[in-house]
Image (cartoon, grey):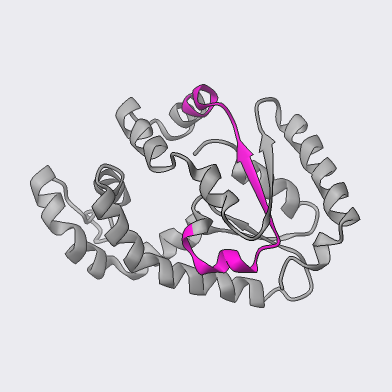
Amino acid sequence: MAAGKNAAADILAARGWACVDADMVNRSVLQQMTLQLVELHQPAAARLGLSLLQPDGSLNRAAIARIVFADPEALHAHEALLHPVIDRKLNEFIDSHPDVPVVLNATVLYKTPVINRCSIILFVDAPCVIRFIRARHRDHMSFRQISARFRSQKHIFTKYKNSNADIYRVWNIGSPCALERKIERMLILWNRNGYCGLLQQ
């Protein structure tokens, strides 16, 4: 969270890569499965005094986030419902771009089978303090909410190391230009190793 993965994806998109934002796919699936999610999380919402629907009938994503990031069991049930649909949509995106390298911009890609189609994982990271400041500035979330998100992503790098893809860690601790230079160096390395032609196998 708030490490800079969106900025990294934008840099690659500007160089002709086809990018899909898994967060946007997730939002689409959330709306698509509103009724199932309300049924799943209603008991917890009732205990917390939360409304799962907005006045216009759309899903209250903030309420859902409050529930799932505070309870590992609720998060597991939530993901079991959504991830198969998200995985299918990400695979469809890859298949629809057969002639260009593809970027899957995602935080928890290791939880979906589509990760097996990836040759490279670019793990964008930053120190916790920097990420916290960015998250406060960007999302205006409380300390407790940010801490819950951080806890849910604890040891995430180790989980990616268990995948079959080659993993490259990039520290985003400076300016956007500094991140761009680091990714440029990665692209040179990937091209040298022949990865750009392998990203969709």
Depth order, front residue of 180/138: 180
Q: Where residue 102 appears, x then y in whole percent?
A: 70, 63
116 drawn magenta: yes
Depth order, front residue of 19/172: 172
Quadrant housing residue 82: bottom left
Rendered view: 100 above or below 43:
below
At x 15%, y 50%, the residue is 45
166 drawn magenta: no
Placement of the C terminus among the 4 image quadrants: bottom right
Quadrant housing residue 49: top left
Q: Where residue 14 appears, x then y in whole percent?
A: 77, 51
Left or right of residue 186, residue 9 in this image: left
At x 57%, y 36%, the residue is 3
Q: Where residue 5 appears, x then y in whole percent?
A: 61, 44
At x 19%, y 58%, the residue is 41
Point out the stretch of residues depicted in magenta. Answer: 111-132
Q: Is residue 168 visible?
A: yes
Q: Is residue 31 visible?
A: no
Q: For the view shown, which residue lies furthest in the right direction?
A: 192
